[in-house]
Amino acid sequence: MTTAMQEQLEGSTPHILSQTPDALIRQIGEMGQPAFRARQLVDWLFQKRISDPDRMSNLPASFRTQLRDSFDWSLPGIVSRLDSEDGASKLLLRDAKGMQFEAVILRYEGRTSLCVSSQVGCKLACRFCQTGKLGFFRHLRADEIIAQFMLANQLLESEERRISHVVFMGMGEPLDNPDSVLAAVRLLTSPDAFGLSYRRVTVSTSGLVPGIMRLADKSLCSLAVSLHAARDELRTELMPVNRKYPLAELKEALLFWQKQTGQRITIEYILIRDKNATRREAKELVRFLHGLRAKVNLIPFNPHPGLEYQRPALREIEDFQSYLSARGYPSPVRYSKGMEVSAACGQLAAKHQESIFSAPLRRNVVTASGLPGTSSRLS
Ligand code: SF4
């Protein structure tokens, strides 16, 4: 069931950011407005990425009031914004009940990525992840995922940038919340909605097989898989989800996804000393990759207080990488900046505090959300 249908059944005011352009056009018609008004609204929302009716300057005041009364326009509050010198901005957001989740803007030459959360907390309890330690609180709705995108675009307006890429690598396992995530992905990639290329929207999963099968639709989005070990015993130790979806089943799902989409898969692999960074594990990884068109992002583990794991020595990292490269698998080592270090799914709470903000903070801005801000680092 879509979020919009759910809202209707529950009798709640539908959120503006859960609407498809078609649904909006129909509803605006039902409100007695001419078709060109609906097209103007769609243009403001999806092309200009503006979600405040007061800024929709070519709409008459009476229509704006009608829109305010007919839809929920609320956005998550911005509790704080932390900027690092390497071009990342971490937004700590909170919902109406005060639950907090995060989104991270990553600026690069020629592109700007946004890492979005799909849940508050996570159920999957990966051993190397602090979000996993928090436990699960709730799923985010599609409008709350799109709201992260709208807020980020709004903040970037003064820099004359806009979000060009979206990655579902924030808090939560996206495919544990597939209805909301798929609805958000469709809005992001539909040519008549936000119109991002499917190559620019990546869902990163710890390997939930049913969800991967649902994503196996040509031109829907790109796929990243947090693998971290290619031997069942070790993967189950690091990622308990492997008990439910062991490697053989995961591989079958990835082969199916690849066949359906014709796309290359990104494999995320956090390198942990004396665990999965050895030659034996590199061999297992190559065996697993056989038959897949894959790129492997190698991410040296960033030690966190409360987590027992360590980063391997440089020599071990290089050895692991050269083993993969020699066998034809591109395997860049992602060391520092934002998403590269945070490339496994949903570890903002852990990773971004250690990586993005390991660079000196430029400023700590509380934006105009009307909410009190934090004045210290989040770590
Ligand atoms: S790594 Fe991803 S799936 Fe695993 S616990 Fe963390 S957020 Fe959840």
Image (cartoon, rainbow, N blue to C red):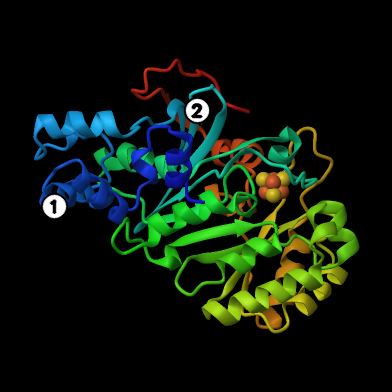
User: On residue 166, which mark appears?
Assistant: none
| Nearer to me, 360 or 34 | 34
Q: Amino acid at mark 1?
A: Ala
- The residue mark sitting in front, 1 or 2, is 1
- Residue 201 or 59: which is nearer the viewer? 59
Residue 35 marker: 1
Q: Position of residue 307 (x, y in %)?
A: 80, 38
Residue 164: quadrant of the picture? bottom left
Q: Position of residue 141 (x, y in %)?
A: 50, 41
- Earlier sequence position, callout 1 versus callout 2: 1
Residue beneath disc 2:
95
Can the viewer see residue 275 in this picture?
A: no
Q: How many marks?
A: 2
For the residue pair 153 and 111, the one nearer the viewer reads as 153
Q: Helix, strand, or loop for circle 1?
A: helix
Q: Secondary structure at mark 2?
A: loop
- Give the CA separation, mark 1 to mark 2: 34 Å
Q: Is residue 251 left or right of residue 38?
A: right
**Relative to residue 190, is residue 309 depicted above or below?**
above
Q: Residues within 10 Å of mark 2 (few under 14, many from 20)?
A: some
For the question of whether residue 310 can be seen, the reply is: yes
Query: In percent of the image, x 26 and y 46: which residue is there?
Result: 27
Q: Inspect the image, locate mark 2, and give the three-letter code of the amino acid beneath it.
A: Asp
Q: Is residue 74 left or right of residue 160?
A: right
Farthest right residue in view: 233
Q: Position of residue 243 (x, y in %)?
A: 85, 58
What residue do we see at 23% from left, 34% from top?
Answer: 67
Residue 83 in the image, given as x and y percentages of width and height: 45, 34
Check the image and report above or below for 185 versus 119.
below
Nearest the eye: 29 or 207:
29
Q: Residue at x 36, y 51 (%)?
A: 163
Residue shown at the point (38%, 38%) measured from the top left: 15
